[in-house]
Image (cartoon, rainbow, N blue to C red):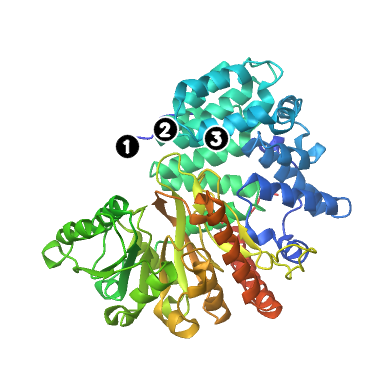
Amino acid sequence: MDTPEIPAPLRLDKSALPPSAWPGILPAFRERFSGWHLGMGTPDVLGGLLRGLNALGAEDLGCRDTARAMGLWGAQAHPLSAPLAAAIPPDALAGHPGLTALLTRLADTPPPEQADAEAAATWHALVRGDDHDLTLHFLTLTLRDPLRWPAWLRHCWQDLLFLNRPELARAALDMIPWDAPSLPLKARLAAELAFHTRPPDEALPLVAGLDPALWGFWRAYAGGELLLRLGEIERGRDGLAMLWQAMPWHVNLTLKLHDLYAPPPAKTTDGETASVAVLLYSWNKADLLAATLESLAASDLGRAGVFVLDNGSTDHTPQVLERMRGLFGPENGRAGLQVTTLPVNVGAPAARNWLLSLPEVRRCAWAAFLDDDVVLPPDWLTRLLGAAREHGGADRIGAVGCRITSATPPHGQQSADYNLFPRPPKAPEPGALPNRVAVFDNCAGSPDTGLFTYVRPCLSVSGCCHLVSMAAIAKAGGFDLRYTPSQFDDLDRDMRSALARMPALYAGTLAVRHVQHSSLARAQTLRQTGHIMGNKLKLDTKYSDEELAALARDTTRLLWDDLETKHAALVDRLGRDA
């Protein structure tokens, strides 16, 4: 595919950027910002960091200048986020009158959930239904109002992105009576919509056409990411390198850019794939399981074995499994499909342990667990194995996971790397349940912008698609049956593995599409919610204060060391124009 001829989309006007006192400040931030290393890919996280920087900025030049730069990035990357806008320092937008006027215009009206709770609830119901005409009618009533549209646009825009109906989002933008100060926002949101819903070669001109005086940071990032998606790796990487020189404090960008310069791991050998057992279990999801097995059979499995446990299904799962056998076996260049059938559903932890107990699986170095509703890229296994090899292999890594997104575009992010907040467990309020395992979920519910495409150690990864080291199973044990039928069993096992000095590894350059969301997100009944809360209580009361403090301390050290090493490598490679 030819890259379209466009104006240079990655060029930054450095005269319009805030001053920077960043050089050499990262070690100081390690002391002052214990959570800085966790990442900053979402507006909520940016807002929290900005509030911390603002508090220190009166006495610290580096904090003040970094807050200015971060505020400018936040305004451009998340212009509709009201909480983030409230945390942006006033002088962050000095020299950017157009952006200042735009944010002022957006802040003029209270949010719908405060001003019109009934209408906000109606919108919530509409986006979970399938009535296209009624949704359009609702948008017409709210977005065509000259006084109400800014608040309603803020309220509706992310839902419109995730509806997988770009024509509806475009219609919403055309309904709004844009005035002069706010009109550039239409172009910015149209470019964002194209970024998430159109082929990269079609989206790139819209991003490049944005006013760099208003949207320079975001324009540079989105343009670089689209070039990467087009396969223009050097052009995309070089554009992101220019952006990084302007904002070297951005954790996600630092990690992403470093890995773009790192050579890919050597090709996986047949001996490595032969050390893997691919494991699936399923209960009454026959059609989803069939699609997953078709995706698995089309991937590069090498000599890996495939084992499926029918966890007491009462639908047509047995017929699906019999049909799927024809996709595997030596005649298809891969190992055969081995099926275990249970008479009853024993729950996820027991199903996993059953699979781990099979003699053929116990002889392997890795158990690759897959959910029964995923869409796999062809190289998923080789990329996970390559990442594991580069970071010490099955004797040092407890589990290797990847980026999990929704299956349909625009690909919403479901999980990346999980880590504990670096603070000691808090005592619960009187009458409240304990919340001692405070996990930082750094991306769930946000669009997949590419800011989580990096590799680094972590506390835990998603169980949707991950390699589990059999050495870690021997050292820390399998899955705890107390979390039956499911929820938190993966996190708990990863925590025990980390306590045994075998942390997890996040390989976020690999994305696996997940058709359904986690059981936590799908909870709809009081019984389901109660079950999840019960399992969280089990997790919160399982570990001592000393164990949780050790986990937070050790993973914090791993993440900071990784960030500082990669930051220093980029400084050596690129230098910096402070």
Q: CA distance from mark 2 to mark 3?
A: 17 Å
Q: Quadrant of residue 156?
A: top right
Please give the label number shown on residue 198: 2
First of labels 1, 3 by sequence position: 1
Given the image, on which type of amino acid does mark 2 rest?
Arg
Q: Nearer the viewer, residue 337 or 451?
A: 337
| Residue 242 x/y as whole percent | 58, 45
Residue at 56 percent across and 69 percent down: it is 459
Q: Is residue 160 visible?
A: no
Q: Quadrant of residue 330?
A: bottom left
Given the image, on which type of amino acid does mark 3 rest?
Asp
> What residue does disc 1 label?
1
Quick one: SS at disc 3?
Answer: helix
Q: How many C-alpha atoms fall within 10 Å of the one at disc 1: few (<14), some, or many (≥20)?
A: few
Left or right placement of residue 34 versus residue 164 in this view: right
Can you say whether 231 is above or below 304 in the image? above
First of labels 2, 3 by sequence position: 3
Can you say whether 299 is above or below 68 in the image? below
Q: CA distance from mark 1 to mark 2?
A: 15 Å
Can you say whether 461 is above or below 101 in the image? below
Please give the label number shown on residue 159: 3
Q: How many C-alpha atoms fall within 10 Å of the one at disc 2: few (<14), some, or many (≥20)?
A: some
Foreground disc of the pair 2, 3 = 3
Q: CA distance from mark 1 to mark 3?
A: 31 Å
First of labels 1, 2 by sequence position: 1
Residue at 41 percent across and 51 percent down: it is 514
Left or right placement of residue 346 versus residue 168 in this view: left
Given the image, on which type of amino acid does mark 1 rest?
Met
Quick one: SS at disc 2?
Answer: loop
